[in-house]
Image (tube, rainbow, N blue to C red):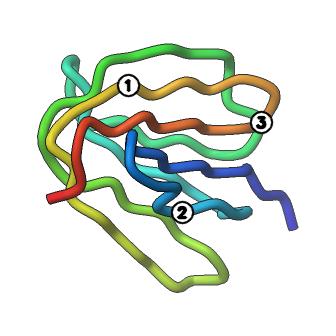
Amino acid sequence: IMSIKLEIITSEKNVFSGDVDYVGVKSADGELGILPKHVPLITELVEGKVTWRLNSKNEEVNISGGFLEVVNNTVTILADRIN
């Protein structure tokens, strides 16, 4: 099964790190879903939920905003704050 690495980081701590099947975020341009082998991307995130799925189990965290980078099958989210 294909997966993509997800890292969610704030200035205080590493919130989540692991392999997932899907990442959903709210960007400045609207809702964004990221699957394995996504093209490289950098986007600004707005306040809202970051969701991820692993083996049909969904998890989520609320962020106040930040940035998302996709490169080499890794999603890095630099969150301003976890709400």
Dividing the image into 4 quarters, which one contains the C terminus? bottom left
Q: Residues within 10 Å of mark 3 (few under 14, many from 20)?
A: some
Secondary structure beneath label 2: strand
Is label 3 in a helix, a strand or a loop?
Answer: loop
Residue occupied by mark 3: 73
Horizontal and vertical percent for residue 35?
62, 45
Q: Considering depth in this image, is 82 or 41 the residue closer to the camera?
A: 82
Image vertical order of residue 78 relative to residue 16, above or below: above
Side of 59 relative to 53 (left or right): left
Graded by Cα atoms within 10 Å as few (under 14), some (14 to 19) or many (20 or more), the crowding at tag 2 reads few
Name which residue type carries label 3: Asn
Q: In 3D space, how far apart are the residues under numbered discs 3 and 1 (Cα atoms)?
A: 16 Å
Residue 52 spot, x, y in % from top left: 48, 63
Which residue lies under the disc numbered 2? 16
Circle nearer the N terminus (2, 3): 2
Residue type (three-letter) at the residue carrying disc 2:
Phe
The dot on residue 67 is: 1
